[in-house]
């Protein structure tokens, strides 16, 4: 009932209503500090919206492996066997799914993992044993463009986009490793996030010339071609598994150009990522 949803997480009820109106699956994240009582109450909130015709993806927190977020330390402190946040993440993911199912809500229990670290994941599992049966897909974020060199940035748009294309090819090796892990555990592989990752570092964000270069890269027609290649490769390598591109609408700036659209109603001719995505989905503008 808060007057705005812009200063905190959007209410679960509104997320579920939006999914219902759009006729789509829902993807819900449970806060890393949520108690069992909170999770059970959430399951009861979700239950009226769950009619079995659409999936409810349920994820414990977000990127617990990422040490820029407080959930990484929180989870690591509860991981005595390995010291890795993934240890607690595995256990808590299963616990949350079990609570939902005990309340009569069937969910797709998502285990988030770091796309570039399949080896670390396997080392953690070697100490923990098999994954709990409550877990279904493993979800990664196979971004491209986050490793562009300073030399490429200094050379301009063509050099940056060329490295982005090379990274798409490189990412496929990581996806293949994750696919092998999932096949071994008889799980699916999905992507909780994906797309380009041309973001200025903290040290670079005061460099307006560089920020504008990365924005221009996102607006360049070649970026649309890269999205087509990226999505086609993902479909080929994962048998068209779910990918949640990050994100729909986001104004570009020093923190990145994450949106497929920069603003609602943007003309397709000026939004190459959005146009390429719609074309890939068979919804060409």
Image (spheres, rainbow, N blue to C red):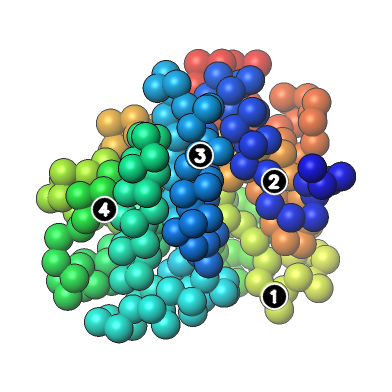
Secondary structure type for disc 4: helix
| Labels 1 and 2: the sequence-earlier one | 2
The front one of 168 and 160 is: 168
Image point (58%, 23%), residue name: 20
Which residue is under mark 1? 202
Above or below, 5 relative to 38:
above
Task: Say whether residue 19 is left or right of residue 102.
Answer: right
Secondary structure type for disc 1: loop
- Tell us which disc is closer to us: 1 or 2: 2
Task: Confirm or deny contact between disc 2 and disc 4 (CB under 8 A).
Answer: no
Q: Position of residue 222 (x, y in %)?
A: 60, 38
Check residue 16 in the rendering and tell me which mark sits there, or answer none.
none
- Tell us which disc is closer to us: 2 or 3: 3
Q: Position of residue 105 (x, y in %)?
A: 40, 35
Residue 10 in sight: yes
Q: Quadrant of residue 229?
A: top left
Above or below, 110 relative to 234:
below
Q: Position of residue 266 (x, y in %)?
A: 79, 29
Q: Position of residue 112 (x, y in %)?
A: 40, 56
* CA gap, disc 3 and disc 1: 41 Å
Number of numbered callouts drawn: 4
| Labels 1 and 4: the sequence-earlier one | 4
Which residue is under mark 2? 10
| Labels 2 and 4: the sequence-earlier one | 2
Which residue is under mark 4? 178
* CA gap, disc 4 and disc 3: 33 Å
Image point (28%, 49%), residue name: 135
Which residue is under mark 3? 44
| Labels 4 and 3: the sequence-earlier one | 3
């Amino acid at each position: 009932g808060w007057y705005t949803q812009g200063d905190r997480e959007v209410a679960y009820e509104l997320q579920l209503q939006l999914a219902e109106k759009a006729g789509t699956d829902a993807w819900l994240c449970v806060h890393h500090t949520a108690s069992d009582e909170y999770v059970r109450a959430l399951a009861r909130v979700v239950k009226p919206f769950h009619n079995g015709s659409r999936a409810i993806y349920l994820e414990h927190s977000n990127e617990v492996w990422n040490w820029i977020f407080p959930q990484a330390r929180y989870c690591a402190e509860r991981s005595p066997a390995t010291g890795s946040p993934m240890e607690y993440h595995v256990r808590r993911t299963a616990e949350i799914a079990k609570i939902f199912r005990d309340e009569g809500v069937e969910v797709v229990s998502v285990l988030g993992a770091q796309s570039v670290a399949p080896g670390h994941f396997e080392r953690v599992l070697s100490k923990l044993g098999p994954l709990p049966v409550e877990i279904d897909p493993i979800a990664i974020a196979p971004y491209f463009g986050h490793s562009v060199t300073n030399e490429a940035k200094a050379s301009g748009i063509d050099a940056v986009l060329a490295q982005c294309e090379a990274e798409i090819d490189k990412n496929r090796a990581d996806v293949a490793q994750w696919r092998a892990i999932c096949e071994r555990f008889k799980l699916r592989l999905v992507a909780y996030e994906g797309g380009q990752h041309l973001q200025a570092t903290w040290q670079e964000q005061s460099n307006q010339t560089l920020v504008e270069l990365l924005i221009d890269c996102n607006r360049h027609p070649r970026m649309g071609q890269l999205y087509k290649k990226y999505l086609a490769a993902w479909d080929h390598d994962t048998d068209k598994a779910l990918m949640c591109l990050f994100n729909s609408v986001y104004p570009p700036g020093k923190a990145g150009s994450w949106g497929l659209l920069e603003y609602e109603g943007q003309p397709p001719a000026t939004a190459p990522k959005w146009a390429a995505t719609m074309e890939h989905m068979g919804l060409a503008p």
